[in-house]
Image: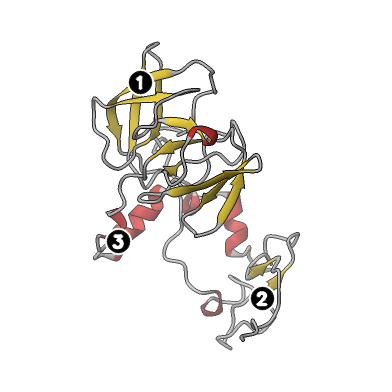
């Protein structure tokens, strides 16, 4: 009788693949949108292992608190604004329709009200390109340009902590515990280096031995390689 493959065991959630409990400190989402402009003060910074960037704790004038991604250059005591008619300042939350062209932004909503989904990694930012045709063009960190709803919200500035990934890790054990904190298995050996019982590409031949194209609805034991690939073969040049 065989045993379950690595990707099947991961789905089960055994001890080797389970995130340690109570390690993530906050869920970073925008507050529900209000027409009334709100002003808040940065009162603390939070180092959350679930995020590559530092977080800032903001207390608003109505004494409610919210956790947002901290921009580069902000400090405790600085004030941010949120809502309709908010001032364009570092860390403030505005709709894309109120943000001028050329402004760096981050933590961008993909759909109005989703709380922020894009450009959230440490050091990343996007740029507002243009307002035209009822849409706002935004240049993403991947150099791709997206057409977004003007009612989507974003924060002003660039995400803090951009130089953290430039620091050398030096020891493999340090990276192991970094990955363990965010529920990532590391190191990951290549499939062709695995045994046949551990991976569909495993075996002595040291190459895949079969096509790496996999259907979107493939079962967990076979869902490796190029999943739902858009094209097959080498790209033509010239």
Viewer-side residue, 44 vs 178: 44
Distance between mark 1 and mark 2 Cα atoms: 52 Å
* Mark identifier at residue 40: 1
For label 1, the SS is: strand
* Crowd around label 1: few <14 · some 14–19 · many ≥20 (10 Å): many
Quadrant in which the C terminus is drawn: bottom right
Query: Quarter of the image holding residue 103?
Result: top left
Picture coordinates of residue 72 (x, y %)? 30, 43
Q: Split into 4 quadrants, where in the image is the N terminus?
A: bottom right
Name which quarter of the figure residue 47 lies in.
top left
Q: Name the mark nearer the viewer: 3 or 2.
A: 2
Nearer to me, 14 or 238: 238
| Rendered position, 35 above or below 98 | above
Which residue is the site of mark 3?
173
Point out the frontmost of discs 1 and 3: 1
Left or right position of 199 against 170: right
Dot 1 and dot 2 residues touching (CB under 8 Å) = no
Q: Quick one: SS at disc 2?
A: loop
């Amino acid at each position: 009788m065989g045993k379950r493959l690595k990707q099947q065991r991961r789905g089960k959630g055994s001890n080797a693949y389970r995130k340690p409990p109570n390690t993530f400190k906050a869920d970073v989402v925008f507050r529900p949108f209000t027409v009334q402009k709100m002003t808040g003060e940065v009162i603390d910074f939070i180092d959350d292992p679930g995020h590559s960037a530092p977080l800032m704790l903001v207390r608003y004038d109505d004494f409610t608190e919210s956790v947002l991604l901290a921009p580069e250059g902000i400090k405790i005591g600085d004030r941010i604004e949120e809502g309709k008619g908010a001032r364009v300042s570092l860390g403030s939350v505005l709709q894309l329709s109120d943000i001028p062209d050329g402004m760096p932004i981050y933590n961008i909503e993909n759909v109005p009200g989703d709380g922020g989904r894009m450009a959230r990694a440490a050091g990343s930012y996007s740029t507002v390109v243009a307002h035209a045709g009822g849409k706002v063009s935004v240049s993403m960190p991947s150099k791709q340009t997206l057409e977004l709803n003007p009612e989507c919200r974003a924060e002003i500035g660039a995400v803090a902590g951009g130089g953290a990934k430039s620091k050398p890790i030096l020891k493999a054990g340090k990276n192991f515990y970094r990955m363990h904190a965010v529920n990532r298995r590391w190191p990951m050996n290549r499939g062709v280096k695995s045994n046949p019982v551990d991976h569909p590409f495993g075996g002595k031949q040291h190459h895949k031995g079969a096509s790496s194209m996999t259907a979107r609805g493939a079962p967990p034991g076979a869902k490796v390689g190029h999943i739902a690939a858009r094209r097959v073969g080498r790209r033509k040049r010239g």
